[in-house]
Image (cartoon, rainbow, N blue to C red):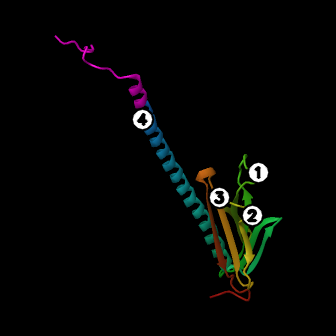
């Protein structure tokens, strides 16, 4: 008659060394799997942050470029007083348009040099509306300057999204030539 669970004299058990070796091997495999998953999550977050940064600088460049192309009067400043860009034109219906771009602080309690949002205030015949064009812009690297010929404006936007190993930085530069001030294009 055979009883289950009893050790017979000719059977050997697991030694303490074998048990410790098995525990170490399982721990090493678990550590490898955990590190692999961690790397995948970091890479995924970095890729997501990069796409957000690209989208933000593209939105800023596209919107500013469209307005500069229409502008008959362009005024800008990038310096101690901060960033602003003022564009003015008269549309085909006779409406007087003014667009003012400014960089405004994003609320960030832990960052001594917070990132900015690009705001666009569009006024048509006295009625105005304000929209946020882009977020996460770096204030020192977002600027408007004339090109060396003085005919075009060069708008540079830099977005920074995330922190640490997941941080993504994207910079784009747009060159736009305002329309001539002598009249409207047909």
Q: Is residue 14 magenta?
A: yes
Question: Which mark is first along the chain, 2 or 4?
Answer: 4
Residue under pointer 2: 140
Q: Is residue 150 left or right of residue 132?
A: right
Residue under pointer 4: 25
Does the CB distance between marks 3 and 2 fall below 8 Å? no
Range drawn in magenta: 1-22
Q: Residues within 10 Å of mark 2 (few under 14, many from 20)?
A: some
Question: Which mark is first along the chain, 3 or 4?
Answer: 4
Callout 2: SS: loop
Q: Residues within 10 Å of mark 4 (few under 14, many from 20)?
A: few
Residue 138: give x, y in percent of width and height.
70, 61
Q: Quadrant of the C terminus?
A: bottom right
Residue, x 45% and y 32% (percent of image)? Answer: 24
Circle on res. 112: 1
Question: Which mark is first along the chain, 4 or 1?
Answer: 4
Distance between the alpha carbons at the discs numbered 1 and 4: 46 Å
Distance between the alpha carbons at the discs numbered 4 and 2: 51 Å
Distance between the alpha carbons at the discs numbered 3 and 2: 12 Å
Residue 83: give x, y in percent of width and height.
76, 66
Distance between the alpha carbons at the discs numbered 1 and 3: 15 Å
Residue under pointer 3: 160
Point out the residue furthest to the top here: 1
Distance between the alpha carbons at the discs numbered 4 and 3: 42 Å
């Amino acid at each position: 008659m055979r009883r289950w669970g009893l050790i017979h004299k000719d059977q050997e058990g697991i030694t303490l060394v074998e048990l410790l070796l098995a525990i170490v091997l399982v721990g090493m495999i678990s550590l490898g799997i955990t590190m692999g998953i961690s790397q995948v999550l970091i890479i995924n977050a970095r890729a997501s942050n990069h796409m957000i940064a690209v989208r933000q600088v593209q939105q800023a460049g596209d919107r500013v470029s469209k307005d500069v192309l229409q502008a008959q009067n362009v005024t800008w400043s990038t310096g101690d007083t901060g960033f602003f860009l003022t564009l003015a034109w008269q549309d085909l219906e006779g409406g007087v348009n003014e667009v003012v771009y400014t960089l405004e602080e994003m609320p960030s309690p832990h960052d001594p040099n917070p990132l900015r949002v690009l705001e666009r205030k569009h006024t048509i015949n006295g009625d105005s509306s304000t929209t946020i064009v882009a977020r996460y812009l770096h204030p020192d690297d977002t600027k408007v300057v004339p090109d060396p010929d003085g005919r075009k404006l060069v708008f540079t936007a830099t977005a920074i999204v995330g922190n640490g190993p997941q941080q993504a930085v994207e910079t784009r530069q747009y060159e736009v030539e305002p329309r001539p001030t002598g009249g409207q294009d047909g």
